[in-house]
Amino acid sequence: MVIAFGRRLEAASMTTLTDEELFRPVVLIGASNLARAFPLVVNGLCAGLREPLTVLAAFGHGRSYGLRSRILGRTLPGIVQCGLWAALSQQSSTRLPLLAAVTDIGNDLVYGVTAPELLAWVDTCLDRLAKHRSETVLMSLPMASIERLPPWKFELLRRVFFPAHRIDWPVLYERARRVHEELRRLATAYGIRLIEPAAACYGFDPIHILRRRQPQVWQEFFSQWQAWDRSVSMAYPPLNESLRLRALRPTERGLFGCRQVTPQPVLKRDRLTLSLY
């Protein structure tokens, strides 16, 4: 399968990445926002980072940091239990410093997980990345958007996105506020950058970034990495390439009770290797 990603890959030669060539590992962790913007993110990474890339990503609609999540018949393991971490440990020592993006923290609160439990899972991810000397950027909860949410709208959105889970709005809001505050502490403790998108980046749906705002948000997010080319303007790839990226499967998932296993990487061409977990 041949896919051209952005202007950097269009200009890149067709040489195959060798074991001796330095490459840049990138870890992407998230849930719905990362899933919705994934073609944009991959296209942007290929344009904004000039070196060969090995991308390891764990995301998915409704993805949990520590629980096995189920959305519309599809199940995925918790992020702390998935195969990304074993794959990261097996990365060659012939590489540039690791870059990481940790996003979409909050689904677990709707599942009934307490703030300390969720923060412990996030802390585990940050600690594992720190052991690999990662330059990590963390996206906080969109509290500026959540604070504008009336209880009736929360109940409506909960029934749409999380119909099997019931939690009262005051309880959820208090847990979200605590997680938001503690993420600042974690960011300081690990010496990483913490980004919170502005309320204007969200619409009726208070947790999913508006499509027209996605390039701006992700560009600001990735520009926190020192290696990022700040002259790049992120853009979606053509529709056919976006569809191909969205069709790629993670190493393990359940689909209506059937376990699917897909060898990784799912994409390897030019100067990009992509694995999903």
Image (cartoon, helix red, strand yellow):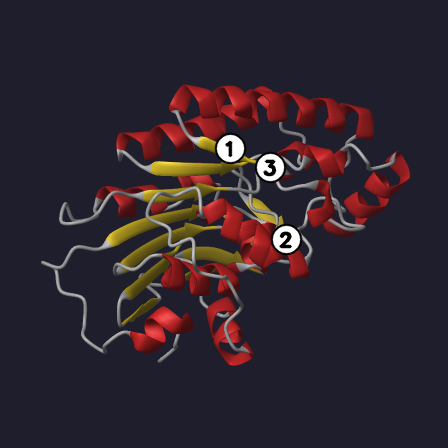
Report the residue at 26% width, 59% height from top: 51
Residue 54, quarter of picture: bottom left
- Viewer-proximal residue, 158 or 226? 226
Quadrant in the rendering for residue 107: top right
Q: Mark 3 and mark 2: span between their CA atoms?
A: 26 Å
Compare marks 2 and 1 and give the one earlier in the sequence: 2
Q: Residue at x 52, y 80 (%)?
A: 240
- What residue sits right under mark 2 in the picture? 71
Horizontal and vertical percent position of residue 101: 44, 43
Asked whether the residues under the numbered discs 2 and 1 touch, taking CB atoms below 8 Å apart as contact, a structural biologist would say: no
- Dot 3: few (<14), some (14–19), or many (≥20) neighbours within 10 Å? some
Residue lying at the far left in this picture: please name it. 20
Does residue 127 sit above or below 224 in this rendering?
A: above
Which marked residue is nearer to the observer: mark 3 or mark 2? 3
Q: Are marks 3 and 1 in contact (CB under 8 Å)?
A: yes
Please determine whether, in this image, residue 193 is positioned above or below residue 40: above
Measured from the top left, where is residue 5 in percent x and y? 40, 72
Left or right for 83, reference 76: left
Q: Secondary structure at mark 2?
A: strand
Q: Is residue 63 above or below residue 20?
A: above
Q: Measure the alpha-carbon separation of dots 2 and 1.
A: 28 Å
Query: Label 3 sits on what residue type?
Result: Glu
